[in-house]
Image (spheres, rainbow, N blue to C red):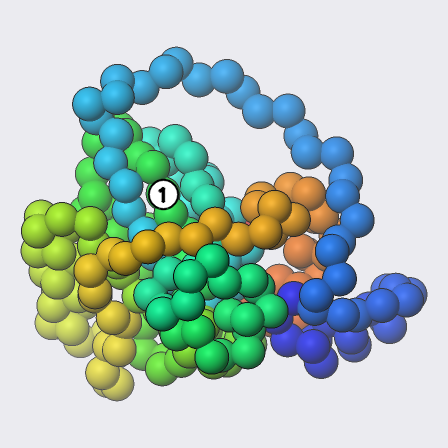
Amino acid sequence: MKSFLIICVLGIAFGLTACSQTKQPSATAVPATVTLPTPDLKNLETATFAGGCFWSMQRMLDEVPGVITTTVGYTGGHVDNPTYEQVSSETTGHAESVEVIFDTAQISYAKLLDAYWHDIDPVSVDRQFCDSGSSYRPAIFYHNAEQQRLAEASKQSLVASGRFTQPIVTEIVAAAAFYPAEEYHQKFYLKSPTQYAMYRAGCGRDAQLAQIWGTTSQ
């Protein structure tokens, strides 16, 4: 997935025999998860974010306290039920995204937004780190008027902070149909940790996040 060149170079370095983006990765055992108390359904809310590689976005969001479930997929475009290959062709208008179910009793949408901002480069147009194209654009897809208000307020706060000299180009748009990605993309960082680590290292996401925010993400 993602950058052909990076995966190919790293594949050669690690003795891999293939570096096709579309080849389904070999599955490895997924670590057992801890059973948590069932949240009150009335406190559950949906959020949707795009921020480049959805493998990396999902890993970050899975680690945020109060996030109940995450699903990687495609949204923001004009093609129904797209495949990964279609989205990667940059002809569907969709962005790689993560749909999040979170517990408002544990985390507010404002705090979820803060976690999101700190895992992206908000001034990059149609790219995030090593991945380029409109399918990698950063975007916040709001699900109601309150989410829209909070998202726009958080963006304006970031502008006012003076941290960035370039315009913040992250889109804030209404959520539309969300299409889950193929199963092998779900929790890719757990299913194929070695391949994910190789991609992550080659993409330079952590180094760039450290430059932008002074912190790193996993």
**Rendered image quadrant of residue 209:** bottom left
Query: Which residue in the protein does label 1 denote?
Result: 100
Q: Residue at x 47, y 79 (%)?
A: 91
**Rendered image quadrant of residue 46:** top left
Q: Is residue 168 left or right of residue 6?
A: left
**Above-or-below relation of 41 to 71:** above
**Rendered image quadrant of residue 22:** bottom right
Amino acid identity at mark 1: Val
* Image location (x, y in percent) of residue 218: 53, 52
Q: Residue furthest bottom?
A: 166
Most foreground residue, 37 or 72: 72
* Image location (x, y in percent) of residue 205: 53, 67
Residue 48 seen in the current view:
yes
Q: Is residue 167 left or right of residue 212?
A: left
Most foreground residue, 179 or 102: 179
Q: Residue at x 42, y 78 (%)?
A: 134
* Image location (x, y in percent) of residue 216: 47, 58
Most foreground residue, 207 or 134: 134
* Image location (x, y in percent) of residue 195: 73, 56
Q: Quadrant where the N terminus lies?
A: bottom right
Q: Residue at x 33, y 55 (%)?
A: 177
Q: Is residue 37 left or right of residue 156?
A: right
